[in-house]
C-alpha cells in the first residue's frame, strides 16, 4: 500500500486560525482541503510537508451565493457546485467544467479552491518516487540540477496546467480573494497563475484562497474538455469560452481561455478582436486559427502533442459555434460528444 | 432443450454472498498475530551488473527484523522447465527497471519502506536492449546466457505442406504487416502474499495466484524444500486474466522470510510493481501472406511473428507457438507455414494474458480477410461462411476439431446487427466490421511433462447431508467454484448453495493445474462429474437395497432420491446419505480428467491441441470523425459458441467482460515503455504505470453490447460446455478495425486504434497506418509436416522425403 | 509526530482510537478495525475500490486522512446489510452477475448506495455517470448497471 510520509496535523477552527498556522508552519506547511491532489502527491513523495493545516472544520469556507454577483467559498466541494441549479443556469462553463473534473467520487471531497490550485502535471513528474529515481528525477527535484525531460536543453519546467475550473472561471471574469495573516487581497483569477510549471501559482505559500467571485454580467459560456475516457482523466485540452452578445449578435465582450496546453491557463489575447463583431463562420475560423497558435501542447500528457494542437483549433471553433447557437447534435463526432457532454446529468 | 435442473439455469453464483458482503478474504485481507511486512528494493536501471548490495544500514533502521539479498537464494526458477531464468532477488545482474534486488522485513510496512532507502547498491550499467529490432541486431550484451542466440530467446518454424509452392502462383496474394501493442491485465487486486509456518512447522503460503500447483512446485525448487513440507493456498483472486499465473519472486521472498524469522510475513505490491510484474500481452509484429483463388478460398497462409518478450522467459516459448498455433482452426487452410521469434528486451516480461498469444495473429488474420473480401467484392461474412472449418476434422497443423458453432455465430450476429443493411451501406463516417475467432478449452499438455491427471476432484458426503467438493481449481472471478457446485448439484440433485467448496489449497485439494488457458470448466468440470457420478452410484446402490427400487429408476433431484416411476416413493437426500453411510461406511469419491492425446506428433506440436475449441463472431458498429480521427464504438453484437452455458448469468458476464477487455486493447490500453534521450539517460521506464494513465475504459466508455450464446453440446465438455472466458475477447479489435475501414476507408493495421493513427491514415497517401516493414530474421529450418490431406501421420518429415513419396 | 486521538462512528458504532496523522481512512479501516471489505487498487484515487460513505457521501478512503473523519459517520460494505438482511443492492448484485472476482464490488455497492439514496429512480445514464469513478476489469459494467436498476425496482416495490 502506498502511504504518505509523516507530518504534524493542525485542525484550523477559522480561516484566521488557518492563516496563522500556515504562517507559523513555514515553507513546509500545506493547507489540507479536499486532499485529492495533495495526498497522492505526498504518497508519491512529490511533496513532503511537515505540517498539514486542515480546513475541514472551517465552515466559513463553504457555500455558494448567487445574488447578482456569484460568490463561491473556496472550500465548497466540486459536487456541490455541480449540483447547484443556480450555477448551472447562470454559469454553464463552470458547471460543465466542474462536472467533468476527475470522477464523481473525487468531486465529493475535492474543493473548488483545490482545483484552482491543482498542481501542474507532467508524465515525467506525476510518478512514484521510485519511477522518478529511475530517470534521475527532473527539474522539479528533489535533487538539484535536474533536467526537464520535456525540453532537456531549457532551464524551465513545462508541466501542464491541469485545472478544468480555472479556464472556465477566467473566461467568466472571476476574481479571487487571498487571505493571509497580513490581510486580504483581491486579484483577477488569471493573475493567480505564473507561466512556470515548477512554481505555477503567484500566491505566497502563506496565503489561502478563500473565495471566488463571478461578476453578474449576462454572458453565454461553455467549457469543452478533451480526455481519453469519459471520466477520471485530467484534461488533455480545455477550451472555455464566454461571450456577451449585444443587439443583433454583435459581441460586446469575449473571453476565451485555453487549458492544458501550457503551464498556465491561457487567456487568448485575440479574444478582444471578437468585440464588435458577429460570429460568422469566417470570424469563428479566423479566430480559431489565430487562437490555436497559442496552444503549445508538449509531450508530457496523454495524446500525441501534434494531434492535441489540431484538436485545439477545432475545439475553439466548436465552442464558439455552440455559443452562437448552432445545434451541437449536428456537429462532427468529437465536437458533438464534447458539446453534449454535461458531466453530471441530474436534472 | 434439456431437463437439467441446475445446468443451464440463470442463477446467482455460489460465492456471491461472500463477495457482496465484503467477507471474501483476498490475500491482502489476511492478517496473523506477529505478522511482519515485506517491501522490495527494485532496480532503477533497466540493465546493469550488481557490484555490491549492502543491507547493513537498513538492518539498523527502526522496526527492521531482517533483510535479504540475492545471495540468500541460490536456485533459479520459472514457470516453464525450459526457461528457469528468474531469481527471487537478483544476484549479479538486473535485466529490467523494477527487477528485485533486496528486501526488508519489518514490523510495519511503513518501516520496511523507509528502510529500503538505506540499502546501498553499486551498479555497473550495461547497454540497454529496448526493442525487438535492437535485440535482433545486438547479440551483445546478452540479457540472458541462454536462448537460441544473442538476445533471441526462441525462434520456431513449422510448415504444413509446401507453402512456397502454393504462394508461387496464386490467383491473389495478400501480403500485410500488422502490429499489436502490448497491454496488461490490470486486475484491480494488486498481487499479495502471506507466508507463515504452520503449527507443525511446515511452510504455508497464501497468495493471489491462479496456479497454486505451479507456485507449489516453484517454491519447492527455489527454496530447496520437499513439496510435502509446503502448503500453497490460492486466495480468491481479485481478477487474474493471466497476470497471476507465473510463480513470482515476491512469493518466494516472503516464504523465505517466514522460514528465517519464524513469523508470518506479508507483501502487497503497489500498482507500479504490478505493472512491472506484467506477464501481459506480447507486443507482436506480424507479416501475414495469404493466397486465395478468385472466389476467395484460402490456398495457403504464411505467417511470421516477432515478439517483444521482455526480460524473462515466463510462458514466452508457449506464447511464441501460440502466435501461430490457432490460425488454422476457424477456416479451411490447406497449407500453412508459421515462423515466430521471441526476443529478450530490458522490459517487464510478457506472458499470458486472456487469449494468450492468439489475439495478435487473430487481429492480423481477420483484418486481412476483410481486405480480401473488399478486394474481391465479397461480403466479409460470406467470405468466411464459404470456408468454415469442418466439425470433427483435423487442421493443417494436426489439431483435432470437435464441435464448431461458428456458422451459427456468424449467422446470429449478422441477423441481429442488421449487417446486410449496414456494411458498405451507411453514410460516410459510420461503419460496421465483422470478425471471428476461436480459442482453446484448456491446453492438452501440462506445463511440465507428466502423464498424471490435469484436474482432480474429491467429494466428501456425510450424514449431515452436506457435500464438500475439494478441487485444486482456483476462483479468479471467472466462477470456477460455481461451475463445480453447479455440476455436482446437478448430478446429485441438490442445491448448489448446499455444497461446500474447498478449492485451490495444495494441502487439502487434489491437483488441478490452475486457472489458465480456459481449462477449468472443461477439465475440473469433467473431473467433478466423475466424482459425483461415483458418489451417486454409491448412494443409489444403498438406497436401492434399502427401498427395493431398481438403481436405474432412482432419480436424484430436488434434494431427494426417488423412484422415477413413482416420485412419492423416495427419501430426502440426507436420509439417502445416512443409508449409504450405514451400508458403505464413510463416503468419499474422486474424479479426474486428462485430455485426449493430441494428433500432432511433431516437435512444437504440443502447443495448440485442446479437447475442444470455442468459436465467436462479433460485429462492431462505429462512428469516426474524419476531421479528428475520433472513434466511437457504438454497438457490439457478439455470438459465442459455448457448447452449453452451465450458468447463463455467468456466461454472459464472461462474454461482456471479454468485450470490455478487448475494447480496452483495441482503443486505449498500452503497456509501453519510455526511453529518455540516450545521451542523457540510460533509463527505460513504464510510460503509464498507474490506473490514471493506463487507460482502462470506465463505465461511460462501454458501448451497447448484445450477447448471444450458441449452444451445441460438445462431446468432450461437461454437459457439453466449452470455454467462454477468453475467446470472446479475440474478435473485438479486428471487428473495430474493419468497422473503421467501412466508416472512412482507412486501414489501421495496428492496435490500439487511436484517433491519432486514424487521422494519420486519413492523411496518408496509402490510407493506412501501421508498420512499414518486417525485419529480416534468420529463421531456422522449418519443421516440415505434411497436412492430413497430403498423406501425413502427424509426424515431421523432410521436404525431400515428401518429394520422393509423391 | 505523536499519535492523535480519533473518535468517529463506523457502521453505526462509535470507534475511539489513537493514530499517526499520516494514516488514511482506508488504512485505519483495514488495519486497525479489521474491516477488510474496503479494498484498494491504487491508493491514489484512480480506481474507486476503496469507496466508503462519509456522512452519506461516497468518497475515496485512500485520499481521506483518518483524522479528517473526527466526529463523522462512516459506512463500509460491512455496514450495508441490516442485521442479517442484505441490502437490495447486495441482493441485486448477486442475482445479476454484477460481482465476478468481487474485488471492486464493495466500492461499486457503496457508490450505488449513495446514488439510489439520492436518486431512487436513477436512469441508466445517471447510473453510468455515478459509477464512472469505479473501475471494474471483469464485467464490462453492464451487469452492474442491470443490478443497480434491479435494486432500484426492489426498493420501490418495498
Image (cartoon, helix red, strand yellow):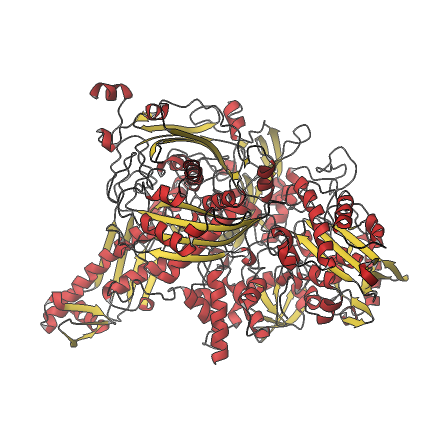
Q: Nearer the viewer, residue B272 or A317?
A: A317
Q: Nearer the viewer, residue B141 or B41?
A: B141
Does the rendering let one see residue B236?
Answer: no
Q: In which quarter of the image is residue B156?
A: top left
Q: Which of B201 and C101 is in front in this view?
A: C101
Question: What is the x, y in percent for residue B573?
Answer: 22, 71
Left or right: residue B341 compared with residue C32:
left
Residue at the extreme front: A248
Q: Is residue B8 above or below residue A271?
A: below
Q: How many labels does the image show?
A: 0
Q: In this view, does B302 lie above or below A21?
A: above
Q: Which of B769 and B505 is in front in this view?
A: B769
Q: Residue at 15% of width from left, 66% of height from top?
A: B540
Q: Is residue B788 above or below residue B427?
A: above
Q: Quadrant of the C terminus of chain A?
A: bottom right
Residue at the extreme right: A182
Q: In which quarter of the image is residue B765?
A: top right
Left or right: residue A9 compared with residue B193:
right
Left or right: residue A78 compared with residue B566:
right
Question: What is the x, y in percent for residue B423?
Answer: 45, 48
Left or right: residue B231 compared with residue B344:
left
Does the rendering let one see residue B712?
Answer: yes
Question: What is the x, y in percent for residue A68?
Answer: 83, 71
Question: What is the x, y in percent for residue A7?
Answer: 72, 57
Amino acid at each position: 500500500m502506498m502511504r504518505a510520509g509523516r507530518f504534524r496535523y493542525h485542525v484550523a477552527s477559522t480561516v484566521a486560525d488557518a492563516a496563522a498556522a500556515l504562517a507559523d508552519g513555514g515553507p513546509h506547511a500545506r493547507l489540507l482541503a479536499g486532499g485529492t491532489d495533495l495526498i497522492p502527491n505526498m504518497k508519491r513523495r512529490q511533496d513532503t510537508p511537515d505540517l498539514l493545516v486542515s480546513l475541514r472544520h472551517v465552515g466559513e469556507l463553504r457555500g455558494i451565493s448567487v445574488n447578482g454577483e456569484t460568490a463561491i467559498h473556496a472550500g465548497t466541494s466540486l459536487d456541490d457546485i455541480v449540483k447547484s441549479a443556480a450555477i448551472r443556469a447562470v454559469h454553464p462553463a463552470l458547471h460543465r467544467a466542474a462536472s467533468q473534473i476527475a470522477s464523481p467520487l473525487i468531486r465529493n471531497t475535492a474543493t473548488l479552491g483545490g482545483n484552482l490550485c491543482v498542481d501542474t502535471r507532467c508524465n515525467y513528474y506525476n510518478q512514484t518516487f521510485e519511477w522518478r529515481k529511475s530517470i534521475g528525477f527532473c527539474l522539479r527535484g528533489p535533487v538539484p540540477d535536474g533536467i526537464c525531460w520535456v525540453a532537456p536543453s531549457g532551464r524551465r519546467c513545462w508541466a501542464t496546467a491541469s485545472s478544468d475550473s480555472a479556464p472556465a472561471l477566467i473566461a467568466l471574469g472571476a476574481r479571487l480573494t487571498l487571505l493571509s495573516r497580513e490581510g486580504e487581497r483581491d486579484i483577477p483569477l488569471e493573475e493567480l497563475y505564473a507561466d512556470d510549471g515548477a512554481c505555477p501559482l503567484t500566491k505566497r505559500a502563506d496565503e489561502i484562497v478563500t473565495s471566488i467571485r463571478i461578476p453578474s454580467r449576462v454572458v453565454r459560456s461553455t467549457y469543452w474538455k478533451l480526455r481519453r475516457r469519459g471520466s477520471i482523466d485530467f484534461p488533455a485540452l480545455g477550451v472555455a469560452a464566454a461571450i456577451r452578445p449585444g443587439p443583433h449578435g454583435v459581441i460586446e465582450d469575449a473571453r476565451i481561455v485555453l487549458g492544458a496546453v501550457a503551464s498556465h491557463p491561457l487567456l487568448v489575447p485575440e479574444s478582444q478582436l471578437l468585440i464588435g463583431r458577429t460570429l460568422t463562420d469566417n470570424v469563428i475560423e479566423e479566430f480559431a486559427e489565430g487562437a490555436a497558435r497559442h496552444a503549445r501542447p508538449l509531450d508530457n500528457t496523454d495524446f500525441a502533442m501534434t494531434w492535441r494542437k489540431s484538436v485545439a483549433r477545432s475545439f475553439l471553433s466548436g465552442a464558439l459555434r455552440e455559443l452562437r447557437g448552432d445545434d451541437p447534435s449536428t456537429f462532427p463526432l468529437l465536437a458533438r460528444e464534447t458539446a453534449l457532454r454535461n458531466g453530471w446529468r441530474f436534472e | 432443450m434439456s431437463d437439467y435442473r441446475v445446468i443451464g439455469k440463470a442463477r446467482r453464483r455460489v460465492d456471491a454472498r461472500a463477495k457482496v458482503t465484503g467477507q471474501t478474504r483476498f490475500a491482502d485481507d489476511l492478517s496473523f498475530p506477529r505478522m511482519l511486512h515485506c517491501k522490495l528494493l527494485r532496480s532503477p536501471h533497466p540493465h546493469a551488473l550488481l557490484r555490491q548490495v549492502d543491507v547493513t544500514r537498513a538492518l539498523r533502521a527502526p522496526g527492521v527484523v531482517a533483510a535479504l539479498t540475492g545471495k540468500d537464494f541460490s536456485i533459479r526458477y520459472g514457470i516453464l522447465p525450459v526457461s528457469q531464468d528468474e531469481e527471487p532477488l537478483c544476484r549479479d545482474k538486473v535485466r529490467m527497471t523494477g527487477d528485485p534486488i533486496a528486501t526488508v522485513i519489518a514490523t510495519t510496512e511503513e518501516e520496511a519502506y523507509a528502510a529500503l532507502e538505506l540499502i546501498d547498491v553499486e551498479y555497473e550499467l550495461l547497454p540497454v536492449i529496448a526493442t525487438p529490432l535492437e535485440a535482433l541486431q545486438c547479440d551483445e550484451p546478452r540479457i540472458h546466457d541462454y536462448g537460441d542466440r544473442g538476445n533471441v530467446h526462441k525462434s520456431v518454424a513449422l510448415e504444413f505442406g509446401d507453402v512456397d509452392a502454393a504462394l508461387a502462383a496464386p490467383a491473389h496474394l495478400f501480403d500485410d504487416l500488422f502490429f499489436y501493442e502490448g497491454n496488461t491485465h490490470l486486475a484491480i487486486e494488486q498481487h499479495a502474499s502471506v507466508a507463515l509456518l504452520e503449527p507443525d512447522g511446515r511452510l504455508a503460503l497464501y497468495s493471489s495466484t491462479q496456479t497454486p500447483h505451479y507456485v507449489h512446485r516453484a517454491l519447492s525448487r527455489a527454496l530447496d524444500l520437499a513439496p510435502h513440507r509446503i502448503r500453497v493456498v490460492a486466495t480468491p483472486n481479485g481478477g487474474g486474466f493471466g497476470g497471476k499465473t507465473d510463480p513470482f519472486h515476491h512469493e518466494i521472498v516472503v516464504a523465505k522470510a517466514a522460514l528465517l524469522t519464524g513469523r508470518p510475513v506479508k507483501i502487497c505490491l503497489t500498482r507500479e510493481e504490478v505493472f512491472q510484474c506484467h506477464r501481459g500481452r506480447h507486443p507482436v509484429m506480424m507479416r501475414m501472406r495469404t493466397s486465395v483463388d478468385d472466389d476467395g478460398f484460402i490456398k495457403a497462409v504464411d505467417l511470421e511473428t516477432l515478439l517483444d518478450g521482455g526480460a524473462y522467459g515466463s510462458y514466452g516459448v508457449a506464447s511464441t507457438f501460440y502466435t501461430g498455433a490457432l490460425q488454422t482452426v476457424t477456416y479451411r487452410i490447406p497449407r500453412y507455414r508459421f515462423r515466430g521469434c521471441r526476443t529478450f528486451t530490458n522490459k517487464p516480461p510478457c506472458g499470458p494474458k486472456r487469449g494468450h498469444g492468439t489475439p495478435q495473429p487473430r487481429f492480423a488474420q481477420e483484418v486481412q480477410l476483410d481486405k480480401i473480401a473488399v478486394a474481391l467484392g465479397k461480403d466479409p461474412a460470406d467470405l468466411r461462411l464459404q470456408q468454415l472449418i469442418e466439425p470433427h476434422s483435423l487442421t493443417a497443423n494436426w489439431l483435432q476439431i470437435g464441435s464448431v458453432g461458428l456458422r451459427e455465430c456468424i449467422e446470429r450476429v449478422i441477423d441481429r446487427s442488421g449487417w446486410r443493411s449496414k456494411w458498405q451501406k451507411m453514410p460516410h463516417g459510420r461503419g460496421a466490421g465483422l470478425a471471428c475467432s476461436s480459442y482453446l478449452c484448456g491446453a492438452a499438455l501440462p506445463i511440465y511433462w507428466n502423464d498424471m491427471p490435469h484436474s482432480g476432484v474429491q467429494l466428501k458426503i456425510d450424514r449431515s447431508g452436506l457435500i464438500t467438493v475439494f478441487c485444486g481449481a482456483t476462483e479468479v472471478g471467472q466462477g470456477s467454484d460455481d461451475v463445480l457446485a453447479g455440476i455436482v448439484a446437478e448430478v446429485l440433485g441438490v442445491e448448489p448453495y448446499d455444497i461446500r467448496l474447498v478449492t485451490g489449497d495444495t494441502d487439502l485439494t487434489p491437483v488441478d493445474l490452475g486457472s489458465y488457458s480456459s481449462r477449468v470448466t472443461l477439465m475440473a468440470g469433467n473431473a467433478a462429474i466423475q466424482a459425483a457420478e461415483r458418489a451417486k452410484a454409491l448412494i443409489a446402490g444403498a438406497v436401492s437395497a434399502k427401498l427395493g427400487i431398481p438403481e436405474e429408476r432412482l432419480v436424484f433431484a430436488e434434494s431427494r432420491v426417488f423412484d422415477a416411476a413413482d416420485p412419492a416413493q423416495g427419501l430426502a437426500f440426507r436420509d439417502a446419505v445416512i443409508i449409504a453411510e450405514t451400508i458403505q461406511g464413510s463416503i468419499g469419491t474422486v474424479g479426474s480428467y486428462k485430455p485426449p492425446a493430441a494428433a500432432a506428433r511433431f516437435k512444437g506440436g504440443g502447443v495448440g491441441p485442446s479437447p475442444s475449441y470455442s468459436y465467436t463472431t462479433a460485429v462492431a458498429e462505429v462512428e469516426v470523425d474524419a476531421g479528428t480521427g475520433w472513434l466511437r464504438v457504438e454497438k457490439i453484437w457478439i455470438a459465442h459458441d459455448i457448447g452449453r452455458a452451465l450458468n447463463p448469468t455467468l456466461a454472459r458476464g464472461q462474454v461482456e467482460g471479454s468485450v470490455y477487455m478487448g475494447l480496452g486493447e483495441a482503443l486505449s490500453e498500452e503497456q509501453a515503455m519510455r526511453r529518455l534521450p540516450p545521451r542523457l539517460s540510460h533509463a527505460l521506464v513504464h510510460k503509464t504505470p498507474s490506473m490514471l494513465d493506463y487507460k482502462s475504459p470506465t463505465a461511460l466508455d462501454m458501448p451497447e453490447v448484445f450477447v448471444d450464446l450458441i449452444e451445441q453440446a460438445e462431446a468432450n465438455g461437461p454437459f457439453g460446455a466449452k470455454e467462454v472466458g477468453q475467446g470472446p475477447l479475440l474478435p473485438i479489435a479486428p471487428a473495430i478495425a474493419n468497422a473503421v475501414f467501412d466508416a472512412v476507408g482507412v486501414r489501421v493495421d495496428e492496435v490500439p486504434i487511436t484517433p491519432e493513427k486514424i487521422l494519420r491514415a486519413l492523411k496518408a497517401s496509402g490510407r493506412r497506418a501501421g508498420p512499414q516493414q518486417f525485419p529480416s530474421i534468420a529463421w531456422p529450418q522449418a519443421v516440415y509436416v505434411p497436412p492430413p490431406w497430403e498423406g501425413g501421420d502427424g509426424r515431421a518429415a523432410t521436404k525431400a522425403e515428401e518429394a520422393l513419396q509423391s | 509526530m505523536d499519535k492523535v486521538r480519533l473518535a468517529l462512528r463506523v457502521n453505526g458504532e462509535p470507534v475511539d482510537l489513537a493514530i499517526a496523522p499520516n494514516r488514511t481512512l482506508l488504512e485505519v479501516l483495514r488495519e486497525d478495525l479489521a474491516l477488510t471489505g474496503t479494498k484498494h487498487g491504487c491508493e491514489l484515487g484512480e480506481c474507486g475500490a476503496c469507496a466508503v460513505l462519509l456522512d452519506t457521501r461516497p468518497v475515496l478512503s485512500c485520499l481521506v486522512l483518518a483524522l479528517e473523519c473526527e466526529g463523522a459517520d462512516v459506512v463500509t460494505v460491512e455496514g450495508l446489510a441490516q442485521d442479517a438482511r442484505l441490502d437490495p443492492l447486495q441482493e441485486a448484485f448477486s442475482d445479476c452477475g454484477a460481482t465476478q472476482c468481487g474485488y471492486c464490488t464493495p466500492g461499486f455497492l457503496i457508490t450505488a448506495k449513495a446514488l439510489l439514496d439520492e436518486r431512487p429512480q436513477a436512469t441508466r445514464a445517471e447510473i453510468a455517470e455515478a459509477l464512472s469513478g469505479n473501475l471494474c476489469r471483469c464485467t464490462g459494467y453492464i451487469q452492474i448497471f442491470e443490478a443497480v436498476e434491479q435494486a432500484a425496482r426492489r426498493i420501490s416495490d418495498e
